[in-house]
Amino acid sequence: MCGIAGKTDWNNSDSGILETVRSMNKKIYHRGPDNEGLLKLDGITLGHRRLSIIDLSEKGNQPMSTADGRYVCVYNGEVYNFPEIKIELLKHKINFRSHSDTEVILYAFEIYGTECFAKFNGMFSIAIWDTINKELILARDRFGKKPLYYTFGNEKNIIFSSELTSLLEDRSIRRKISYEALNCYLALGYILSPMTIYEDIFKLEQATYLKISERGNKKEKKQYWDYSETFRTKNKDSEFDTENKILNLLEESVKRRMISDVPVGAFLSGGVDSSSIVALMKKHHKGDLHTFSVGFDQKSYNELPDADRVAEYFGTKHHGLICKVDNGLDFINDAISAYDEPFADNSLIPMIEVSKLASEYVKVVLSGDGADEIFAGYITYKADKYYGYARPIPKVIKKLMLGINNSGSSKKKLSRQYKQKQFLNGTLHSKEKAHYLWRQFFSPEERADIMGVQYKDLISDTDPFNIFKKYYDKAEGMDTLDSNLYVDGMTWLPDDILVKVDRATMHSSIESRSPYLDPHLVTYASSIPSGLKMKGLKTKYILKKSLSKILPEFVLTKKKSGFNAPVGSWIGTNGNDEFKTFNKYVYDRKIGT
C-alpha cells in the first residue's frame, strides 16, 4: 500500500518539475512512510511513497522498471494473485529480481498490455510509463478501492496523484470550485466520479484505464471490466450448493488477502460481515489474531459489547476504545481534515479512530466491507420492496402524511418517523428515483438555500440522479434488486464506502483489505437469483445461511446497526436532522459560508 504521484513534461521544459513532484510526495507521506522514491525521466517525473507489505527489501522499492528499462511503474495497492500470474510469466523466460507484486505488474503489462488489468485480483491505482513510445497509462481496480486523481496542465501535461491535496502542490493547477460537485455533495454527502470539488480535476473511474500519448494530444479511456455483465447470467445451483459455493469463495478470498510479510489483523464490529471474516481468518491465522473495535458512550451507537462477545467466542486478542462525547468536536474536526474533499458519511469518524487503534499493532487489516452491496444488506432494499405496496396510495394523502410527519428528536441512530418520512417522499417518484432518494440529504430547494438562489437552474440541470439514471439505463432488463445492487456498486460503494475506508486507514498508515470484493465472489454473488439474496424481507438471506456454518446464532440474529457516530449530540443537534447538520458542518469547513 502506497501513494503515487507524477507529472509529464513532454517538452522537458519544466525545470522545477522534480521539486513539484517531491512536494506532492510529501503530502502523501502517511500513505507510505517506509520509503520515498523519485525518478525524473525524459518526458515524465514519477514519485512514490511506500508502505512496505510484500517483499520488505529495497528490491521492492518504487519507481520500478523492467530489466531493459522500457517500462517504469509506480503503484498503490495489492495484487493478491501475483504468485499465479508470476508462474504464467515465467513461461516467457522473465528473470524476476524481487518477490514483489509490483514487478509482476510491470511484466504482466509488458506481455499482455492493457489486458493485464482484468487479470489482476486486488486493489490498485497504477501508473506505467513507456520510455520508448512516451506513453503514460493510468489504471484503477474494479471497484476503485485505491484513489487516483488527475488533471491536465500547461502544454497538455497530465498531473496525477493518490490524493487531491497532493495534486494541488502543483501551483499551475486551476482551483475553481465545481458547483456541480457541490450540488452532488449536498444531495448525497459524497461526490460521484469522475467529478471532484474542482472543475478541472477528475477521479479516474473504477475498472478503467487512461492512456495518454502523442505528447498529450491523444487520450484513450477504456473500461476493462463491466460490472453490469456479471448480473446477466443467473446460475442454477441449488440453495444448498449456493451456500457452499459462497463459503468456499469467501474462504479462498480471505486466505488470499492474508498474504503479507507484516502482521495482519481485522476490524470487528460484532455484525455478520466482520465476524465472518474473523471466523475464517482464525481458521488460517498462526498465532494471536488481533481484532479492533470502536464504540461510543451513547448506548444506541455503541457496538463494543457485541464485538467483545464475538472476539471472546473466536479467541482473538481484542482491542476496543470508547469515543466520548466530551471529545466529539475533536473527533469530527480530525476526521474532516483527513479527507481531501467534502465528505459527510459520519461513519468516517469511528473509522478514523479504529484505524488509529489498529496501527499500534498491525500494518494490514481485513474488513467486511462490500457484503451489504453484493448480498443486499441495507434497509433501503427493504424500502424498495415496500415501494410496490405504497406506490398506489394517492399523492395527496402521502403529501398530507409528510406534512404531519416530523422527525422530532431521538437518541437513536434513525427514528421510525425519519424512516417513514424518507420512505413516503420516495414513493412520490419512480422506483429508480425512490432508491436514490432513500439516501438523499438535502432536497433541490434546500440546496438552493445553501448554495444561493442564483444556482437554482444549475442545481436542476446537474441533478446527481442523472448519473444514477445512466447506470439504471445500463441495467435495463435486470430485476429491481439486481439493478439497485448494480447502481449502488457504481456509486455508493466506490465513492462513499471505499473512500471512507481508504482515507481513514491510510491516514494512520495501515492497509485495509476487503475479501467480499474479490472478483470471483462478486461475480458469483451477481449470478445468484435475487430471491435468494433477499427472501421476502430477509436481507442477505443466502449469505447468512452460508455463514451459519461458521458463525454462532447470536451473530446471525443480531439486528443490523450502521457504523455511525452520534454527531448530533456532539454538534448540538439531536434527532435525525443530525445527518443534514453534519453535511452542512462539513460543507462550511471545507467550502466556507
Image (cartoon, grey):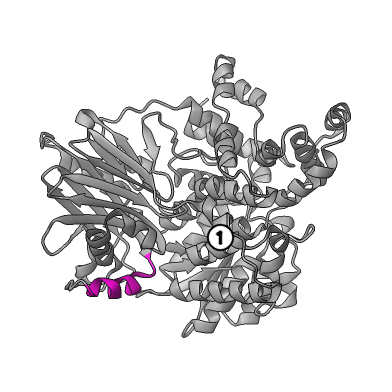
Q: Where is residue 168 in the image (x, y as percent from the top left)?
A: 32, 36
**Is 82 part of what is drawn in magenta?**
yes
**Mark 1: few, some, or many residues within 10 Å (few <14, many ≥20)?**
many
Q: Residue at x 44, y 54 (%)?
A: 142
The kind of secondary structure the magenta stretch mainly shows is: helix
Can residue 452 be seen here? The reply is: yes
The answer to whether 457 appears left or right of 94 in the picture is right
**Residue sitting at the far top:** 454
For the image, the number of numbered tags is 1
Figure check: 516 above or below 454 = below
The picture quadrant where one finds residue 313 is bottom right
Q: What element carries label 1?
A: loop
Q: Position of residue 559 (x, y in %)?
A: 75, 62
The answer to whether 446 appears left or right of 172 in the picture is right
Q: Which of 324 and 350 is in front in this view?
A: 350
Quadrant holding the N terminus: bottom left
Q: Where is residue 129 in the image (x, y as percent from the top left)?
A: 20, 50
- Residue labelled with disc 1: 369
Figure check: 309 above or below 566 = below
Q: Which of 196 and 262 is in front in this view?
A: 196
The picture quadrant where one finds residue 407 is top right
Q: Where is residue 347 in the image (x, y as percent from the top left)?
A: 59, 51
The answer to whether 448 appears left or right of 429 in the picture is left
Q: Which residue is drawn at 25% across and 71% down?
A: 89
Q: State the extent of the magenta-drawn residues as a range.
A: 79-91
Can residue 2 be seen here? The reply is: no
* Amino acid tagged 1: Asp
The answer to whether 364 appears left or right of 418 in the picture is left
Q: Which residue is drawn at 60% across and 41% down?
A: 472
